[in-house]
Amino acid sequence: MPEPGDKIEIKEYDNCPGCGSSFIGNPIPEESIANYNPLDADPNNYPNTHFRRVIGIEIKGQRDGVLHWKCPDCGFRWHRFTGLVLEKGKKLSKQKGFTLAELLVCLAIVLCLILVLVFSMKGCPGSTNNLSFKAGTKVMVDGVPGTIMGHERIDTDGNYTMDTWVYKIRVIDREGEPETIQAFESEVTLAPER
Ligand SMILES: [Zn+2]
């Protein structure tokens, strides 16, 4: 950004030489457009079609007409005929609120956090959730020998967030009948080899 004392090119700026904000304003209404253009201008091709937002400053006793130009957004001011920078523009604060892109990124992050939270409680679909015994492994459950049939998720309290993984284990009950029981990983040990 040019500093006071610097000189900038003398020309009609479409953007502020300080902050870059556009000086092009609203379109001039058709019924009054001739008033804003030279008398000999071609009505089909007026050079001035939009209002300009730049502020023209006239200084009493110095000149009858604009002497300084000033940006309506940052306040950057320069001399119309010398290009001398007279006032440094303020740094424009970032626009308030979020842009759409920023909002989408925030939503994506929140969604990821929710997914991580849910899967860390439920176990990811298709994963074994750290269960280490494969189907067919001979194991002991509370002193009873059995065979791992597989594992499944069970609902421990009617609330899905408390689902947990258990082994389905085929054991032989006291009457000698095969029975499938469920056991948490912590209750299962590898059967001693014979
Ligand atoms: Zn500016």
Image (cartoon, helix red, strand yellow):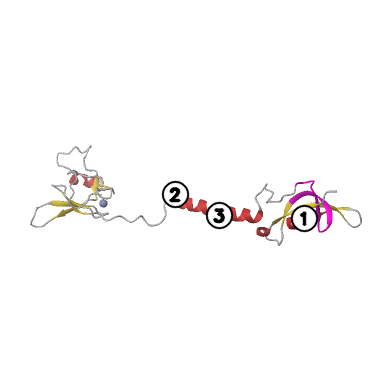
Which sits in the foreground, 51 or 150?
A: 150
Name the kind of residue labelled 3 in the image: Leu
Check residue 113 in the rendering and tell me which mark sits there, or answer none. 3
Name the residue furthest bottom. Answer: 157
Q: Which residue is mark 2?
A: 101
Q: In the rendered structure, find residue 6 and report the number of the disc placed on it.
A: none
Q: Residues within 10 Å of mark 1 (few under 14, many from 20)?
A: many
- x and y percent of residue 85 in the render? 18, 51
Looking at the rendered structure, the kind of residue marked 2 is: Ala
* Residues at marks 2 and 3, CA–CA distance in whole angstroms: 19 Å
Q: Is residue 35 magenta?
A: no
Please state if 108 lies on the left or on the right of 17 as rendered: right
Q: Nearer the viewer, residue 45 or 150?
A: 150
- In this view, the residue farthest toward the left is 61
Going 40% across and 57% down the picture, which residue do you hit? 97
Which-is-in-front pick, marks 2 and 3?
3
Give the CA separation, mark 1 to mark 3.
32 Å
Tell me if label 1 and label 3 are in contact, CB under 8 Å.
Answer: no
Q: Which residue is mark 1?
A: 188
